[in-house]
Image: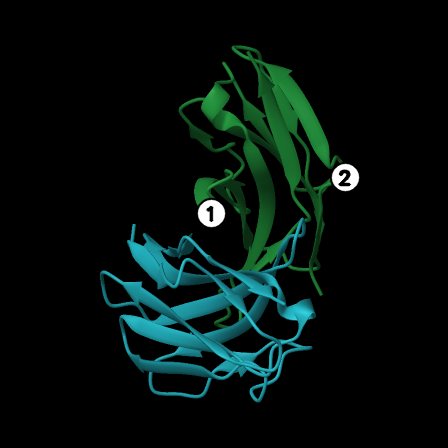
Chain colours: A cyan, B green
Amino acid sequence: SAVISQKPSRDICQRGTSLTIQCQVDSQVTMMFWYRQQPGQSLTLIATANQGSEATYESGFVIDKFPISRPNLTFSTLTVSNMSPEDSSIYLCSVSSAAGYIFEQYFGPGTRLTVT
Amino acid sequence: AQTVTQSQPEMSVQEAETVTLSCTYDTSESDYYLFWYKQPPSRQMILVIRQEAYKQQNATENRFSVNFQKAAKSFSLKISDSQLGDAAMYFCAYQRTQGGSEKLVFGKGMKLTVNP
């Protein structure tokens, strides 16, 4: 399985500012995913990031609010823009890794964001 | 759209006992994958076990096993000989096999407490 790191692990931000979260993988992967986990809730997919193409966003998430970069096969960033207290969540990146013919997803440790 | 339901928000079990976590899902597809993930307080999502829908045999990983009932669209997780380290949130997840999308659809999760 892939080893995934995220930076920062947590942050407290003022409303109206932006935060960029980094996700680094120890091996080359095709697909990376960004999820949001609001307090006490399940994970919701924000977008899928493939290297060399625009990210694909899920319903309810837009590029202007959550711009994503995927410059190479081991790295991605998610920016949370113009933050409000409603953006307070854990943000997790995951990667898809082939296990035989199945693509299993492995997750980073998450970034806990608090917006005041 | 696929949906995943975990109807029990919390459960508790005595150490060394067995506990079963329930999950149901809704899909019109015949081929797919199902997963159980564990999220301890460290918030790291850990893949526990997976099941391919085309396989009749239930998956087993050490103390973890599933009861996969395809016709009933049920996918329960059994934890045998429960240990204190099993205390966590458990999420059931569905993954399509078609269309090139590997995104996961998660249930709401269930909090498992292990009592010494």
For the C terminus of chain B, give its image quadrant: top right
Labels 2, 1: one chain: yes
Would you place residue B104 above or below residue B20 in this image? below
Name the subunit of mark 2: B
Query: Residue B3: in sight, yes or no?
Result: yes
Q: Residue at x 57, y 89 (%)?
A: A64
Q: Which of marks 2 and 1 is nearer the N terminus?
A: 2
Q: Which residue is drawn at 63% across and 78% down?
A: A61
Q: Which residue is drawn at 71% across and 65% down?
A: B1
Name the subunit of mark 1: B
**Quick one: SS at disc 1?**
loop
Disc 1 packing (10 Å; few <14; some 14–19; many ≥20): many
Q: What numbered label is drawn on residue B7?
A: 2
Q: Position of residue A43 (x, y in %)?
A: 60, 57
Q: In this view, does B111 lie to the left or right of A30?
A: right
Q: Which of the 4 quarters of the picture holds residue B62? A: top left
Depth check: give the residue in front, A30 or A113. A113
Q: Name the residue under label 1.
A: B45
Farthest-out residue, right: B7
Proximity of marks 2 and 1: CB atoms separated by less than 8 Å: no
Depth check: give the residue in front, B66 or A24. A24
Looking at the rendered structure, the kind of residue marked 2 is: Ser
Query: Residue B75: in sight, yes or no?
Result: no
Instruction: Please count the marks in the image.
Output: 2
Depth check: give the residue in front, B34 or A62. A62
Depth check: give the residue in front, B61 or B83. B83
**Quick one: SS at disc 2?**
loop
User: Comparing marks 2 and 1, which lies closer to the viewer?
Assistant: 1
Q: What numbered label is drawn on residue A8?
A: none
Looking at the rendered structure, the kind of residue marked 1 is: Met
